Amino acid sequence: MSVLRLAIPSPLRRQFDYLPPADLSAEDAAALQPGVRLRVPFGRREVTGYLICVQPHSDLPAGSLRRALEVLDSAPLIDPALLQLCLWAAAYYHHPVGEVLGAVFPRRLRAGGAQLPAGEPGWRLTTRGMGLPDGALARAPRQALALAMLQRECAVTAAEFDRQGVTAAVLRNLRDKGLIEAARIAATARAADSGADPELTLNPEQAAAVAAVLRQRPGFSAHLLEGVTGSGKTEVYLQLIADCLARGGQALVLIPEIGLTPQTLERFRRRLDAPVAALHSALGDAQRYRTWEAAREGRARVVIGTRSAVFTPLPRLGLIIVDEEHDSAYKQQDGFRYSARDVAVKRAHLEQCPVLLGSATPSLESMYNALTGRYHHHRLTRRAGTGKLPQIKALDVRRLPLRAGLCPALIEAVRDSLQVGHQVLLFLNRRGYAPTLRCHDCGWVAECEDCDARLTVHRQRRRLRCHHCGAARPLARRCPGCHSDALLASGLGTEQTEDFLRQHFRQWPVFRVDSDAMQGRAAMPALVARVNEGSPCILLGTQMLTKGHHFPGVNLVGVIDTDALLFSADFRGEERMAQLLTQVAGRAGRVGDCGTVLLQTHYPDHPALQAMLHHSYAAQARDMLARRQAVGMPPAGQLVMFRTDCPKAATGEVFLQRLHDAAAPQLPQGSALIGPLPSPMQRRAGLFRCQLLLTADSRRAARVAAALLVDIAAGLPLRHGLKWSIDVDPLDVF
Ligand code: ADP
Ligand code: ZN
Ligand code: ZN
């Protein structure tokens, strides 16, 4: 007898046994391969399950097993290494394996749908179209452009036409003339200009990094590429990818969500003579599915994607790159809480290929691995091309008059820069007009009804908004307590500084760059293009500005509120600050003269700031590591967080206390529990949050202890709408 052990999309952290479908012979059932999808009954529903293995028997009595209804795939759609990766991730993150697999398959396949015919919708020339003389359609330039593309490529996908600005109406016109016809086209045909850009000659540091990675082939090796902003990391990636392609492999490139701009993609497409596909959250289901299939069939040779792309099936995977590896966007913060960077390293290990993590400001995790010899460490210490590294100075603003947060010296410096035709970038990591609305007469403060947080004043949209749960209400004109109209917006946000800059620097354009001003995918690329035309302007923005964008004309960077970064309650606060400031600083002087970075502060002697001024990020990272080591925090020690969310404060605390008491006597050596404690921000979106922290001195102890806690938690009753979650290697403990 064969029993099918399946992963089922369900919150239960276990696998489920089923009998094979009735119409399947015993041999066929025994020969089913792990990874195939099956339609099975589950409770009163039918769901898609994934075969983990075929067993000779079940631990449950045979009479109690239900029968699977149908095998959906004749062969598994994911290969054994990817299935193994999913099983590892489910075990490591203590997440239900059915939900992990759900993250791998596109919606259509998750819902049990059949595979679609290969190819993308597109167009090709008819016989008549092929016979057209040169210079035809000269009076319809758009149609002529479309025709020229088809003459070059034989067939072009609708997506590629769209990318080149050829509209559906133009194509319909050509079709009506009998010149082109619709067709399904092998997806990800390479772009028209693919491989058009030549390879650059690497400088010695870049060449050394490339050679070092190539030397470790074949097989697994992990590399940290620590290169200052503008040092040519991307060039290193490109040459390694070219090598991987030349050997017939596929390459996976991960980038943080915000870094995947059309320019990035364009740069890869123009340099690599191979089909390059992108996977990101803005894709529709159909497009995501087609890209997934193209990768799975090996047609897409390079896949560039955000976090979840780490689970893309790539049968000939030969190289993984994680760009800006320190970026917190790699960590999924709800549901299946995984780190795409860490999964990428594991995947390279399972697939026996190199993985390269790149950053100007590596995470302490990766620094630790590099310093302890687990990763090869390569450095790019100077800027490629002509750019020089900027000079960083602190501006002591104590006792100085501030206008919208700017001291006279900074205002002066901005004017000087603009007057000689340079661009200026001002950094203020707080959007909105002001973070607090207060009544001058009675002291009332506008607070969110659902969070322990103040509401931010957004003046342009006349709203009060909570930046934690998204709640919004109209901007009050009178105090609800005393009806006074003396309401003060206090504190500083980007809208306020923008108002000042516009008044004070009338001759020059001011661009505000935050998530309010930059809505829609096209906004940021349009801004980057506009700014990079080069005329002097002021860019004022939040951390949105710091992520990977190139502004070669920027010569002065001002950090308006450095102090907001200096003081953070979280154990990663200092690391975040150092990364953010280094990344902001990296925007200055990318081409030509050496730029200047001015940090406004009330605490010019603060050690973290001094470190920033006098040491490299690397030296600072070593310092921070030593301090983490002293207190047993990650990456020196292991951290796992259990959190409850529930409508009543006491419920979560009681639950976690019971969990604590049941687990404490059985904890493995080297692990300990802290709490339960209310989260630093206790109430959020109407739910009370409480946490129990597990610390351990080894991964093994952490795994064993976490498994114990998960087991106990699964057996505790869930009362009053309580939900609990586990976060392995949490980014922060809020
Ligand atoms: P990073 O990814 O480290 O920020 P990039 O790869 O984007 O840096 O390179 C920064 C700039 O330097 C780009 O304009 C790039 O074309 C240029 N560059 C990189 N490597 C070289 C090289 N070997 N020779 C000349 N220019 C280079
Ligand atoms: Zn009042
Ligand atoms: Zn709120």
Image (tube, rainbow, N blue to C red):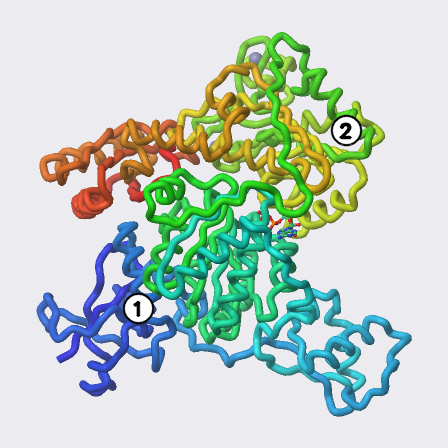
Residue 284 occupies quadrant: bottom right
Report the front residue among 417 and 502: 417
Q: Is residue 210 above or below residue 549?
A: below
Type of amino acid under label 2: Ser
Residue drawn where x is 79% and y is 23% of the image: 504
Mark 2 residue's CB less than 8 Å from ligand 1: no
Q: Position of residue 563 (x, y in %)?
A: 53, 21
**In the image, which disc is placed on residue 49?**
1
Q: Secondary structure under badge 1?
A: strand
Q: Secondary structure under badge 2?
A: helix
Q: Decide if residue 206 is on the left or right side of residue 164.
A: left
Residue 164 seen from this side: yes
Q: Is residue 366 above or below residue 220?
A: above
Residue drawn where x is 25% and y is 64% of the image: 43
Circle 1 crowding by C-alpha within 10 Å: few under 14, some 14–19, many from 20: many
CA gap between label 1 and label 2 equals: 62 Å
